[in-house]
Amino acid sequence: MRHIISILLENEAGALSRVAGLFSARGYNIEAMTVAPTHDPSISRMTVATRGSEEIMEQVLKQLNKLVEVIRVHDLTEGPHIERELMLIKVHAVGQDREEVKRLSDVFRGRIIDVTDRSYTMELTGTGEKLDAFIHALDPGMVIEVVRSGASAISRGAKAI
Amino acid sequence: MTSLTTTQDRPSPELETEELTGAEIVVRALRDEGVEYIFGYPGGAVLYIYDKLEQQQDVKHILVRHEQAAVHAADAYSRVTGKVGVALVTSGPGATNAVTGIATAYMDSVPMVVITGQVPVALIGNDAFQEVDTVGITRPCTKHNFLVKDVRDLASTLKTAFYLAATGRPGPILVDIPKDITSHKTRYHYPGKVSLRSYKPTVKGHPGQVRKAMQLITSAQRPMFYTGGGIILGNASGELRKLVRTLGAPITHTLMGLGAYPASDRQFLGMLGMHGTYEANMAVQHCDVLVALGARFDDRVTGNLAKFAPHARIVHVDVDPSSISKNVRVDVPVVGDLQQVLLEMNQVLTENDQRNELQAMQAWWAQIEEWRQRDCLHYNQDDRIIKPQFVVQKLFELTGGDAIVTSDVGQHQMWAAQFYGFDRPRRWVNSGGLGTMGFGLPAAMGAQVAEPDSTVVCITGDGSIQMNIQELSTCLQHHLPVKVACLNNHYLGMVRQWQEFFYENRYAMSYVDALPDFVKLAEAYGHIGLRADTPADVEPVIREALRLKDRMVFMDFQVDPTENVYPMVPAGAALSEMILV
């Protein structure tokens, strides 16, 4: 099963590599990983999308907690949560495709952020599935470049993790 | 509460007036930490530190001949004393040579601080001379590591390093110090205590879980205790003895746990696992409640996991939550410091006065005694060729069972564990987790430094001893009268044994041709060498070695080259499926 794990950790050189190293050393899978400082600049928040059985997830959480720089670990998929990912996508857009791509972008609530006479660059946010769906809706030959941020996620309700 | 390297704990100007260099701070911090001995090897990046070490007497330095040995010696010093071991090495090759020692200590959870020199801050990342990414290389084999980039953070980082090494599940901490930092000056302030928002190890056991555990244990018909290195590291041997004696239950130890419960006591069934005793392994396989204390269900202990202790409900106490339910599902987990939790368990036992049903316990012991009758460690010593087991048995007898014994890795290690009965903790020092050949001799040095008046014996083999043989020179320089007992079978014996059992007697690269004359070698290093060729030589050689109290003695026992370690649970088999003699 897919899990989204939120990690609060000291914003220090090497902390990211400790977490990444733990996943590779213990053979845990990483689908995506994002990290940036929080409103407290001494703390970073990392979001890891991973897959594994219940037993493996229990170990993942325990092993993460064991890292000296990790302050808090939480499996967001245990409760209601919101997941978002940012995608920047550059596509060929000439002739009648220009109108078609713009319509499709509107349907997916994307925004066109750069235009040339032959291309559009768009910004989309949403769940991973939504972004996948957008890519599939385009003619595969049209896509020039895709940049995805990986999932960011937060729990629902008034409390922090 | 601070993050790991914030400057909050930097010295404030009013605390001390005098400014110290980074090198002076290192030495002062070691002194303030109560460090008596460090083990190391100098080099360019640590010369300022060595210069300051030279100008004081509080912190004494043992000069090894290879950085790996410095770390092993510091490791053994820690295992024997319970204090944090300290090693000091230079950058680049100094640090990489130390890695095997660090990984060894990490696998066996030994509290240690390793200080490495680094190239000056401005050169980091430039492929400078003797530069290596030490924190990068050691990240997976340390509990934590630091690169100090500001002299004002040096004292607090060292304090944090000692704190992290010794608390929670102990382990090695590395502090990498660039050369220029050791010459920069700042005011010295060594923090009194450390509080980290990201690191809060659990000490006390959850009271409900402790009660649940005791309920399960005392309701057992066939209880069995299985304890590991955690009891030794946690100084929990006293509480363990009390609990196990009160309950009258059988107990076994892992390789790392030997000495926690007296080997001479009837309730002790010997070691369990791949080369464990028949009675210990059978008892684990047939018990209805297994009490695992400070042990981690290692593959060398459990055999085939699917068939491990099939009838047992399991209680597991460990300071490290990630050890619980890692390999084996546990019924009653308790996270906490072993000494503390065992104290709580003993309290519950006193209050409730609950005991296991007498009749069931009698039947259980009758069964165990029957298994014990199998005499699985039996061997025949004729008058022609020395059996390695006989050497260890004689060592045990002639040292009164009270030597500190270090070992290397292989057959001799297993025979030492099987035939030298330890009645006290911290007398048996070996590399259990990583299985590092070359550990034994430097470990013996560290043990001898820790206890100058004790007999320290390194039980080793002709393969392992050559992996750090250069340390004989250290023994001479620092007057360390360790006794090496080399069970010389001219083979990498454990490799040979596996090749005999599982590779149809094809002895690929396990025969060690062209061995040195160890007696002459010992003499070349300025020591005494003794050789035993026949069984009749064994006792006189050991007696002579022990008589030479102040000399390092190398005993070369020419033992049966084809002897195997029994019992043996083949990899992948259940614990009860032992190959017996």
Image (cartoon, coloured by chain):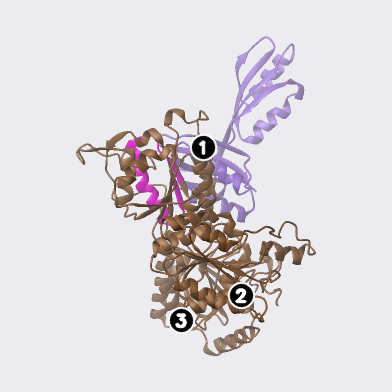
Chain colours: A purple, B brown
User: Residue, x 66% and y 25% (percent of image)?
Assistant: A146
Between discs 3 and 1, the one toward the N terminus: 1
Q: Is residue B412 above or below residue B156?
A: below
Q: Position of residue A120 (x, y in %)?
A: 65, 16
Q: Is residue B114 magenta?
A: no
Q: Is residue A19 above or below residue B495?
A: above
Report the residue marked by disc 2: B389
Between discs 2 and 1, the one toward the N terminus: 1
Q: Nearer the viewer, residue B285 or B383?
A: B383
- State which chain disc 2 sits on: B
Q: Which mark is residue B133?
A: 1
Q: Is residue B454 above or below residue B66?
A: below
Relative side of B103 to B382, left or right: left
Query: Label 2: how many residues lie within 10 Å, few (<14), some (14-19) or many (20+)?
Result: many
Q: Nearer the viewer, residue B54 or B91?
A: B54
Mark 3 or 1: in front is: 1
> What distance separates the C-alpha of mark 3 from that of mark 1?
51 Å
Query: Label 3: how many residues lie within 10 Å, few (<14), some (14-19) or many (20+)?
Result: some
User: Residue, x 52% and y 35% (percent of image)?
Assistant: A35
Report the residue marked by disc 3: B245
Label 3 and label 1 in one chain = yes
Residue type of the residue flagged with mark 2: Gln
Q: Which residues lie in the magenta part?
A: B145-174
Q: Secondary structure at mark 1?
A: loop
Tell me if I can see residue B169 in this picture.
no
Between discs 2 and 3, the one toward the N terminus: 3
Position of the C terminus of chain B, as image quadrant, is bottom right
- State which chain disc 3 sits on: B
